[in-house]
Image (tube, grey):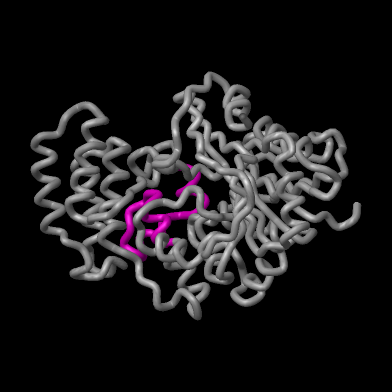
Amino acid sequence: MPSPLITIIVPTRNRTELAVRAVRSVLESSGDDVAVLVLENSDAPSLSAASFRGDGRVTVLPSDRPLSMHDNWERGLEAVRGDYVGYISDKDVFLAGGLDRLAAVVRDTRPVVLNYRKPSYCGERRLLFSLPNRGGVSTVPTAPLLDAWFDMSQHLHYAPMIYNSLFRVERVQAIRARAGRFFVGNSPDVCSGVLLAADTDHYTLVDEVLCLAHTGRWSNGYSSQDRGASGSVFADFLRLYGRERFDALGLPICITAAIAETLLACREHHPAVLGDRRINWQRMVIGILEELDALGCSPAERAEAIATLRRPGSVVPRGAVRWGAIEQWLTHYDSKRPPVSQFVHRGLSFVTRSLVPRSRHVGPWNPATDAKPRPAATLDEALRLAAA
């Protein structure tokens, strides 16, 4: 097979049926200029070329042992071919013709980063979180993205990352050559967006829904987490990653802290551009507390997280957070704590606005505020709505 224009990499772990569905959606939405690389990272690898009916566009790379998410993703870059690369989860599904549309833009504009719209379908809640899209292709500056990431004002679900974008392979490999690897930190999707934003002054947006994310547990057990490090969702994460990096930085294990840890890793990785950037620790702490409460953590568990953030050696600088105001409000909040989760969210939104004024806040476990929930009983229905 000649070198493809685009390679789509699909990391998967212990989810054969989902991986087959994801790969099939790639093959059905593209022509011969797109190749698929499956990173089989299961405990007992079962995927092979035969799993995809011998389609010559598909290559399966089994791992000889389970790898952490970022190590598994990194080995995909060692085998990638072609001019552009993108990753999708084994839970994702491309819409019909989606990759053909991206390939056409790539040929016309040859961007460094090509971002597209990727709404989420939550099967458990039977809701499609639709995204507004105006159609067309535009150029967007990257500097505001870096400002927003380090400001910790929101988890930028729809910012250009390698999970919802195509990256020029030569640019990715140049970063790898300079620093030894591309994916750093515990959130490789966040890392990819930050490093490419630091490496180029703009990206190209195809303002159309071309793929659908089916929300759920990530392939290495690190997703919308359950409370407590011994919870089932944490089990794979702790077994594969360990907790040393979090403990060394004085961060509790949660998504918000993982984003901060990844930003620090990116800063070490690319000091020429990111070395002077500082994380907004006040907003990071509030984000952690909001996340823990949204997950139903007890006051004792939350207090343990605060103690971790305040201990000597924590990356949170002394004096960077108004701890007195936060703890005073939490004491009052616990004395009035209602049993209904919606009141929890409203109360936390109040303290967020009170302590850290901001025009817009997005918790790391929620879709962006501009996403509109729409009922969809099945994934097929969600795909029809997304394509409409």
> Position of 99 compared to 138: left or right?
right
> Position of 23 compared to 315: left or right?
right
State the image coordinates of residue 56 (x, y, percent, origin top left).
87, 44
State the image coordinates of residue 273 (x, y, percent, origin top left).
49, 77
Quadrant position of residue 174: bottom right
Quadrant position of residue 89: top right
Quarter of the image with the C terminus is top right
Magenta stretch, main secondary structure, is helix
Q: Residue at x 23, y 49 (%)?
A: 352
Vertical comparison of 323 with 16: above or below: below
* Bounds of the magenta segment: 235-261
Q: Residue at x 76, y 53 (%)?
A: 6
Would residue 318 be seen by someone viewing this image from the given angle? yes
Vertical comparison of 168 with 1: above or below: below
Q: Residue furthest bottom?
A: 272
Q: What number of labels is visible?
A: 0
Q: Residue at x 79, y 59 (%)?
A: 82
> Position of 78 compared to 248: left or right?
right
State the image coordinates of residue 127 (x, y, percent, origin top left).
47, 26
Would residue 13 be seen by someone viewing this image from the given angle? no
> Residue 239 magenta-drawn?
yes
Vertical comparison of 366 with 149: above or below: above
Q: Residue furthest top?
A: 377
> Residue 255 magenta-drawn?
yes
Q: Residue furthest right?
A: 1
Q: Residue at x 75, y 49 (%)?
A: 37
State the image coordinates of residue 332 (x, y, percent, origin top left).
8, 42
